[in-house]
Image: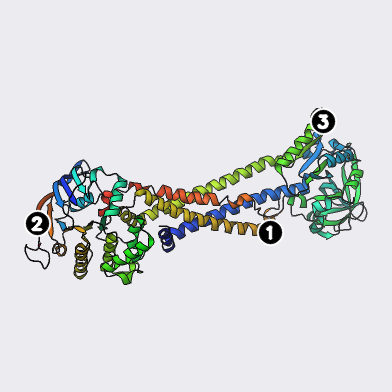
Amino acid sequence: MIRFLYLGLWRDRSRSLFPLLTVVFGVMLTVVMFTWIKGFEVGFLATSARLGSGHVSVMSRAYADERDQLPNDAALAGAAGIMERLRRDFPLFSWTPRIHFAGLLDVPDEKGETRAQGPAGGLAVDLFSPGSPEPAILDLEPALVRGALPRRAGEILLADEFAANLGIAPGASVTLIAGTMHGGMATANFTVAGTFRFGAPAMDRGMMIVDLADARTVLDMDDAAGEITGFFRAGFYDREQAETEAQRFNDLFAASQDPFAPRMETLIAMSGMSQMLGWMDAMLGIIVVVFLAAMFIVLWNTGLMGNIRRYGEIGVRLAMGETKGRVYRAMIAEAAVVGLAGSLIGTALGLALALYVQEHGLDFSAMMRNASMLMSTKLHTHVTGTAYFIGFVPGLAATVLGAATAGRAIYKRQTSRLLKELET
Amino acid sequence: MADEKLIRTENLVKIFPMGSSKVTALNRVTLSFQAGEFAGLVGPSGSGKTTFLNIVGTLDAPSSGSAFVLGRTVEGLSHREAAWLRNRSIGFIFQTFNLLPVYTAYENVEFPLLLLKTPAAQRRKMVMDALDWVGLADRARSRPAQLSGGESQRVAIARAMVKKPPLLLADEPTANLDAENSHHILQTMEKLNRQLATSFLFATHDEKVIGYLRRKITLVDGRVAGDENCRARGAEGTEPC
């Protein structure tokens, strides 16, 4: 009987090919959409961690409460001591201090008068200390567009687009005008060593990268840091582990009433990412449900059309003594074979496409010029274990459910009408 | 209830609702058939021929009265029991052949044996024997679309006969065939009736079929209007039908 079922499917393409193509397409699309959103999520987290505040970040409570305003007057004092403690008690992470600041960048002419000026966002990281993880974390070398990496104090990197807007090239002198940690005005001259492009519009529009020691001097933040950022040594963000470690750290200071006591925040707890990731998870759920529903409706319809087309065949089989239940089960078995094959092929094609895009990425820079999020303009898919069954299970289920629903018509056939029906 | 007759009906009545009214398709029909008969129900359209075949073929149940077929009471059969009886003991031949189009002649004939779970080796022999009976062993690999009308009906006969059922029901089996093919088909059935002792019961108003019958039951408005034994073709004695 299995051979009979197989032969029917093989020879009658309208009972196999169209449903198969529907399942293949639906499953493939589900896999690609899933890996695409996962890729967006992972890329967003990775870029945010790399160029922003790490996988976890330790800052003062006061700083954390006003973090969006870069309140360096609430920066962590005694950063070296906290760093030492973090390295000892939280070895899962690689720790490095950062200062985020904002200011005005002034470009003087040969007479020292302002030639160009623009608001700048600043990121101060440890560029020169031996063993500093920052050059590797920021991956500065490939991001360099013009000039060279800073080699000594007083040299900075400028976003290439920003430098172009200011009309300056590597070697130019610029003056930073900013506020110190204590509320005073700070000015300092820097030399632009090179320009960079991270492919993250929020960074590439108006950012400067300064060595931490320079920033501390200029902003009067000796042994202080806006944040001490931690990066998982494993290289990728582990949401549960990050939350566990943050809770463990914060419990150490739970009894303190000091608004400047340190607090550890996780990547997704910062900047409303939790809400965004929740939205992405919801979108994934919706996508799977929508594809399942669409495939179910199409396959149900295909099943109904198949029943009409095979009306005579079903009638003959019932007349010959095959029970309705057996005919019904045979229809479902056919659907299961088609669903299994379609889901396997669809998953394989979807994964192949997803793996290709995971490796090579797709450049969306033209569409993301005004994006304010810290994320790369080259978007990649991200293939996880879930991708192997996210389309497979709904594909198989929709096919079987579609056939099961359509096949109920078999039970409505009246055997008393078979001879009349089979006359035509 | 067991019965020595192959088929026996007593006061068989079948009423169909037709909107607010009712149509009596069979009206107190009492008939019996012995094993090995080659009989036909004749009469105009609407006389109840197909309804009678439906009931003795366990495809329908009577409104009242009784039908005993192969020792079973039709009105007491469940859907599954009726299917089982058809599967094992009753063959059907339809006016429009109704071969399964995606399967070869061999596979069409094999299908009833698959339902009976006949072992493969035995199945192969039975299928080839059946195709041989109807003279189509060499067309075993042909699909229905590659067969003529006469050949298709012969495959349908092979499919109905392959399990050697004691009873074969044929509803207008020659309606879609020309005269030559009709005679060929009827000769084949007649031969199988003699060789395998299978009882044939036809519903027909085709004179060519009637000419082959050894018993003719005339139905008019759901009642038995005549029941006569006829002379077999080429035999001495009674009148031909």
- In this picture, residue A178 sits left or right of residue A240: right
Q: CA distance from mark 2 to mark 1?
A: 86 Å
Q: Nearer the viewer, residue B80 or A238?
A: B80
Q: Pick the quarter of the image with the C terminus of chain A.
A: bottom left
Q: Are marks 3 and 2 on the same chain?
A: no
Q: Which residue is mark 2?
A: B228
Q: Chain of mark 1?
A: A
Label 3 environment density (alpha carbons within 10 Å; few <14, some 14–19, many ≥20): some
Query: Are the two marked residues, 2 and 1, in contact with CB atoms closer than 8 angstroms?
Result: no
Instruction: From the image, state whether disc 2 or disc 1 is nearer to you.
Output: 2
Considering depth in this image, is B98 or A322 the residue closer to the camera? A322
Kindly identify the amino acid type of the residue bearing the numbered disc 1: Glu
- Kind of residue at badge 3: Pro
When asked about the image quadrant of residue B204, the answer is bottom left
Q: Give the side of residue A19 with respect to residue A109, left or right.
A: left
- Seen at 58% across and 44% down, the residue is A285
Disc 1: which residue: A359
Horizontal and vertical percent for residue A212?
A: 88, 47
Q: Position of residue A214 (x, y in %)?
A: 90, 47
Quadrant in which residue A311 is drawn: bottom left
Name the residue tied to disc 3: A259
**SS class, disc 1:** helix
Depth check: give the residue in front, A299 or A411: A411
Residue count near mark 1 (Cα–Cα under 10 Å), binned few <14, some 14–19, many ≥20: few
